[in-house]
Amino acid sequence: MRDPDFWDAPPPPPPPFPPGAPPVLHMEAPAPRIRRGDVRAALLALLHERPQNGYQMIQDIEERSRGVWRPSPGSVYPALQQLEDEGLVTGDEGGGSRTYRLTEQGRDQAARHADDAPWVEVARTVPDEHHELRLLWAQLNEAFSHLIHTGGERQMEEAKKLIKQTRRSIFQILAED
């Protein structure tokens, strides 16, 4: 039996982006090299400083790596669970989040590797001249996201002109060589 409300309903409005385009800007730059165990080492190092929740640790890693490395929750929370299973950390529920702290065994292990800061090594895998570009791109992405969600028609038109001109200018810079 055919549901007329479903089949005869008008199609949803098109998204504000071209089909297949992501709703955010992505910069294709040299990808940072993250080694196996870097997430684990970073979490232990951060918890050696103070108890934190997973989200705080993700933010700290991103900040300390100068925006080069932002581990996903899908890599951080399983690593925290493994550290908890090994008896190196313990998690306490409170205020709507889980705060992790090192156990005595975890403090011993973290102290042995206190000088290892995996975010420094990960940041070094991206050439220095790309760090500022990555930061500027992230800031542009944030502004673009605000424009898409809150911009009016006039603001959208001005932004389109600016983006087109910026694209042309970048290609002119590239053509100079």
Image (cartoon, rainbow, N blue to C red):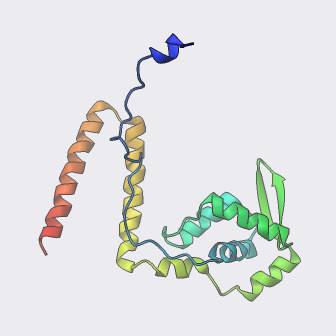
Question: Looking at the figure, which quarter contains the N terminus?
Answer: top right
Question: Looking at the figure, which quarter contains the C terminus?
Answer: bottom left
* Vertical position of residue 138 compared to residue 84: above or below: above
Judge by depth and name the residue closer to the eye, 71 or 78: 78
- Image coordinates of residue 48 in percent, x first then y, are 75, 76
Residue 10, by quadrant, is top left
- Image coordinates of residue 147 in percent, x first then y, are 37, 41
In this rendering, position of residue 177 left or right of residue 130: left
Residue at image location 72% in from the left, 75% down from the top:
44
* Vertical position of residue 85 compared to residue 97: above or below: below
Residue 169, by quadrant, is bottom left
Residue at image location 39% in from the left, 26% down from the top:
13
- Image coordinates of residue 79 in percent, x first then y, are 72, 67
Count the marks: 0
Residue at image location 62% in from the left, 81% down from the top:
117
Judge by depth and name the residue closer to the eye, 56 or 1: 1
- Image coordinates of residue 39 in percent, x first then y, are 65, 72
Residue 84, by quadrant, is bottom right
In this rendering, position of residue 19 left or right of residue 72: left
Residue at image location 41% in from the left, 36% down from the top:
150
